[in-house]
Image (cartoon, rainbow, N blue to C red):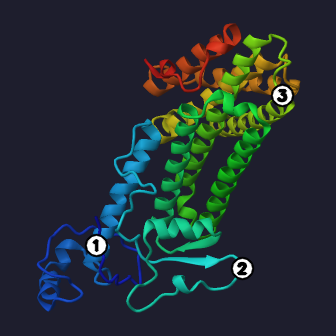
Amino acid sequence: MGYDQIDISPNTLTTPTVFFKTFPGSVVTDPGSRIFASEFKADDNLDPEISLIEEKRRVFWEVYAIDKWYSLVTGLPCAFSVDSRSLICTKLPSPTTFLPLNGDMDPSSQMTSEDESSFYLHEAMQKLDKNQVLIDLNSSSSKILLLTISENIIKWCKMFLTIVELDTLRSDQSLQSIRLKIDELVRNFENLQSNLLFFDLTTEPLMNIVINNTTTLLYQSILLKLSSLFSLQLKEDPTGATISSTEKSIFTEILGEASDLSIKLVESFIKKQRMEHHLKKAPIFIIFSNSLKSLLQCAAYVERFQSILDLDKNKEKELWNLIETTKTTIYALNQKQSTVSKVRTILERGSDMVEHSASSFSFFDSFLDAW
């Protein structure tokens, strides 16, 4: 799928346009099409600097971004699935340029008269892997790359939860490789965020939602798998003697990182003015609900494994203080609003389970979201 033709990039992108009419030829090469297009200029609001090929690309990538976003907030599979066996042959919106961090220009990034620095998605991903800085003048490619990376991380989480056997986690080498993988994913995500924000501040709200939600899912996937390993080992030896120091160390580190992220997100939200208004927005409601469930899950892990792990008592107190503070804040809101009622249900059911049956609470269980 795609339009592999010369890309005439715009000089200005201040007015986004969507063009739906079909022409018999290319505006770039067919004089008849240019005349036909000029007749509809007033009606279509078509920027004369943007070719029809570019218009088609942007429409395609907007559909792609909506698909990725919908999948992120609902958990449903993406319609556009990109992997090593499938490529999208439609170029990214123009102009999309990259700058190597070492200051040396990459010949493949040079703009030419025939291709105004437009790349295919897999080419752009390869450039990010090489730590080249994205300079995207219209922010569309930034959004596309961010959502694609998020999808890849979520795919990795699903693979880790469903395919990796518990016995393979017993070796220190496997655990260290997982720790390095987590660090790599989080670091690349953070670098991409800083990179994109440096050039485009308008995408910050979207990026924060995508990055925080994806990072939360990553942490909770690892913790779930390791907790399953702990449960198996405690059945073998209730004293926990078979749990290695490496296992304890990595679980404690990731639990601390997940707790810090959850605390930061929940605190930032409950301090917002007009909380009821914000909760009506589906993306914000979803990231807040996931952050709240992550907070409860971290408290459950502390409750379950505090006898075998060297956990910070102050962190446990901080988690429960925030849970109670959040309850007080939510109880003060209009309970007739459906999203407020849903958040209250998560808090009440979740905190009750953590206090009385911590092992039965799971961040990924859907019953918390069944109203």
Q: Quadrant of the C terminus?
A: top left
User: What residue is disc 2 on?
Assistant: 102
Q: Outermost residue toward the top?
A: 356
SS under mark 1: loop
When the figure is inspected, residue 269 is found, relative to residue 38, above or below; the finding is above
SS under mark 2: loop
User: What residue is disc 1 on?
Assistant: 3
Give the foreground label among 3 and 1: 3
Q: Residue at x 38, y 71 (%)?
A: 91
Place of residue 205 in the rendered image (x, y in percent of width and height, measured from the top left) = 55, 52
Q: Residue at x 55, y 24 (%)?
A: 333
Q: Rounded to the nearest whole Å, what is the CA distance between mark 2 and mark 3?
A: 42 Å
When the figure is inspected, residue 84 is found, relative to residue 320, above or below; the finding is below
Q: Which mark is residue 244?
A: 3
Q: Quadrant of the N terminus?
A: bottom left
Which callout, 1 or 2, points at the residue further toward the start of the chain? 1
- Check disc 2: other Cα within 10 Å, few if <14, some if 14-19, many if 20+: few
When the figure is inspected, residue 87 is found, relative to residue 224, above or below; the finding is below
Place of residue 170 in the rendered image (x, y in percent of width and height, measured from the top left) = 74, 30
Q: Residue at x 25, y 77 (%)?
A: 52
